[in-house]
Image: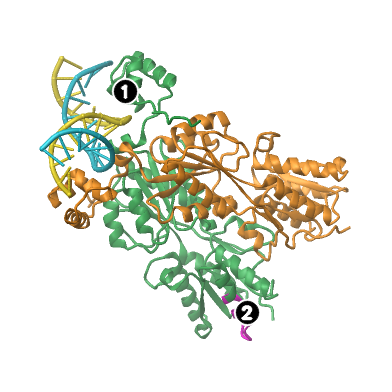
Chain colours: A orange, B green, C cyan, D yellow
Amino acid sequence: MSIARSRSVTISDVAQTAGVSRAAVSKVIRNAYGVSPAMRVRVEAAIAELGYRPSVAARALRGSSYRLALEIPWVGARFMTQIVEGAQLAVDGTPYQLVLAPAEGHAYGTLESMADGMVDGIIAIAPLTDPEWLEAFAARVPVVMIGRHDHPRGYDTVVGDDVGGANAVMDHLLGLGHRRIVHLTEPETVTAPGSGTPHSVRLQVYRDRMATAGLSDLVEVVRRDDSRAGTLAATRELLARDDRPTAIFAGHDDIAMDALAGVAAAGLTGRVAVTGYDDTDLAQHPLIDLTSVDQQGVEMGARAATMLLERLQGRTEPRRHVATATLRVRGSSGRVVS
Amino acid sequence: MSIARSRSVTISDVAQTAGVSRAAVSKVIRNAYGVSPAMRVRVEAAIAELGYRPSVAARALRGSSYRLALEIPWVGARFMTQIVEGAQLAVDGTPYQLVLAPAEGHAYGTLESMADGMVDGIIAIAPLTDPEWLEAFAARVPVVMIGRHDHPRGYDTVVGDDVGGANAVMDHLLGLGHRRIVHLTEPETVTAPGSGTPHSVRLQVYRDRMATAGLSDLVEVVRRDDSRAGTLAATRELLARDDRPTAIFAGHDDIAMDALAGVAAAGLTGRVAVTGYDDTDLAQHPLIDLTSVDQQGVEMGARAATMLLERLQGRTEPRRHVATATLRVRGSSGRVVS
DNA sequence: TTGAAAGCGCTAACAG
DNA sequence: CTGTTAGCGCTTTCAA
């Protein structure tokens, strides 16, 4: 026995029940100007009685859907949790609903799909997306980008102080006496010089600081494989060498976790310093105890959402927020052990 | 200099450019029956030339939005990563877009909001939602629920074998000689007997097995606080007692992480067995090395999405999938240490 | 095979 | 203050 899919109650039903026009109902639900208290009461009663809920599709077709999209490259990344939490915080109490859009591969498809009418604005974490394309895209729908160092005309950006953060890491490691410092980061596409991605900046700072410290010969950049297994293998190989590094500067905490796993697998726990980035909840766990850079992910998410809300209010000039980066020193990074 | 928000190209524009009717364009983009090859070519050329993309809102108003919602209670839960990954896998290659809807507090609001017109179907993880309410809800929009042990008429369910999984955990711990086994789980609301939540089942199995083993006196259930700090404090207090437990059966891996933190804080690492549930990626990390129950989260997500797709094809009789649970024994759970 | 026309549910002028 | 009306962009009979 299957249940018939019930047709949902529309604004006309409410209007009829309340004995008013549809326009009146529309005004009431939008808190628009020009409704008598009496009418408001009757309409609200009818709405409650019928359990009426406005159709998002119909609203979107006419104007706004009251939905905001947050595009994220990979749900499993711990840093995303912070961003989402912050964005949700900022959206709470507004009439907007936050929806997350996981991108499969390139972000273009997902972004366009969202812009196709489902949302009023978009927050996106898409460091590799072409700036020109984004400008054009932002002309269609309000956009705030997280984690880009560019200075766009048509959209807002929220980005961490990657120069400061990476320098803090290098200060720390060099200060501890480390020389053989390896940078374990994302694939080349994500770190291309001048690409403006956070990871390209961190890499550049690494190179610069190594050079300044007279350690250019020891510069070594290892790429994180797509698979955890690959990263592990790379780390293991690294640690098997005679001149193995004494410290690993990981591009972010998830990579650092892989590095820690590699160090543990090599039986070198505590003998190789590891630092992460993002200060995710894991970094604070006593069993991990990872030195990491806190770039206020929650705050970043909240700022991004607030900026988007501002754009929805009418702001058009671009804004930019740079989150401060603070090194949280923990047990994973100690002095050189010989 | 702000850029004017560009009006997007509509089906009429395409029709005009191609010199055909809007209906014709509609048929082409839907691959509907009754279009001559010649017309198809012209229309497709126009679509490409204009960069036309159908409006989701307009489509949704007339029929389907080609969007599927996956409601999740808390993005930070590691188990969710598996579910999302699976669901995405199952949706890839279909014309559907998966969007995630984080619920703030009760799921009702989020579920209704999604049903208000922007999605064709909903997958939800909402163990506490009232069955009656859900039946009514499922009459409005196709629904698949994850993690419910009820046998509904109007929606599908995907659930783990919590009886089997919890028994495997108890087999393991009792077999290792543990007697003082504490169950660390979610707040009471989530584990109420007969509520049919996974955690209520796991708790019941714990009680039953303790009783069967003649350990009823030692039954002890500790609740996870909302905050990580709270759980930590509870764990610490537990471990400070003279008759401290020798084993902690945690309701899921995230709780187990807190337990491990508490054990570490008490300086008892390796001396108190800890088991988790869900076998998240963390459990496999060498520094965590957590014994956990693999209930095939990815498979569960994929099944749920597939079932929803089937409902969208027209199936109305309810289906139910029970995922097998397998204990993965790791280093976190050893014999009793005195 | 193709197109004309009628809406889907809502909002926004504009009249009354 | 209230109601009428004209669409938003698309799908879908129904004729031609």
Please tell me how many numbered marks the rendered image carries. Answer: 2
Q: Secondary structure at mark 2?
A: helix
Q: Position of residue A88 (x, y in %)?
A: 47, 54
Q: Is residue B303 magenta?
A: no
Q: Which mark is residue A334?
A: none
Query: Residue drawn at (65%, 42%), measured in percent from left and top?
Result: A198
Q: Is residue B70 above or below residue A267?
A: above
Q: Chain of mark 2?
A: B
Check disc 2: other Cα within 10 Å, few if <14, some if 14-19, many if 20+.
many
Q: Nearer the viewer, residue B14 or A142?
A: A142
Q: Is residue B240 magenta?
A: yes
Name the side, left or right, on which B59 lies relative to B329: left
Tag 1: residue type?
A: Ser
Q: Quadrant of the C terminus of chain A?
A: bottom right
Q: Which residue is mark 1?
A: B12
- Left or right, A208 with reference to B248: right
Callout 2 amino acid: Leu
Q: Residues within 10 Å of mark 1 (few under 14, many from 20)?
A: some
| Residue that label 2 marks | B239
Tell me where the magenta segment starts and ends, as one range.
B234-244
Badge 1 element: helix
